Amino acid sequence: MLVEKLYNKLRNIMLKVLTDKEYHVIKLSYGLNCDKLSAQQIADKLNMKGSSSYVRVSQLKKQAINKLKSKMNYSQVADYL
């Protein structure tokens, strides 16, 4: 129950701050309410083509984390921890 509430809170924050692709990269990278996938598996799942698509996934992940860190108020999730 608490885990579900925390997931829903984080999901709502991520959907407000991140692009759709960034959201899915974070969700799949960390296994948020799904199986955790590798960068290559994420690239395949998101139909990202090219030999360095897994590198692009890593870039998107870093970009998304930086966005969340800069725009997120830690008190939004502190009550759940």
Image (spheres, rainbow, N blue to C red):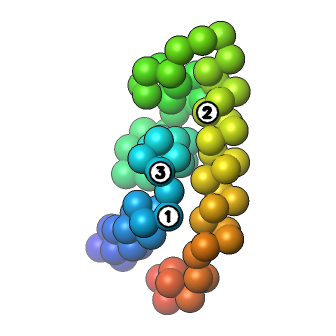
- The label shown at residue 17 is 1
Look at the picture and state if 55 lies above or below 27.
above
Q: Residue furthest left?
A: 1
Residue ranking furthest to the top: 51
The answer to whether 43 appears left or right of 59 in the picture is left
Q: Callout 3: 10 Å neighbours few (<14), some, many (20+)?
A: few
Q: Secondary structure at mark 2?
A: helix
Which residue occupies 67% across, 68% down?
A: 69
SS category of the residue bearing label 1: helix
Question: In the picture provided, is 57 more to the left or to the right than 5?
Answer: right
Are the residues at dot 3 and dot 1 in contact (C-beta closer than 8 Å)?
no
Kind of residue indicated by mark 1:
Val
x%, y% of residue 1?
A: 29, 73
Residue at 58% x, 82% y is: 73
First in sequence: mark 1 or mark 2?
A: 1
- Image location of residue 12, percent across then percent down: 37, 68
Residue at horizontal 43%, vertical 21%?
Answer: 47
The amino acid type found where label 3 is placed reads: Thr
Q: Which residue is mark 2?
A: 57
33, above or below 67, in the image: above
Q: Amino acid at mark 2?
A: Val
Quadrant into which the C terminus falls: bottom right
| In-front residue for pair 17/34 | 17
- To which residue does mark 3 refer? 19
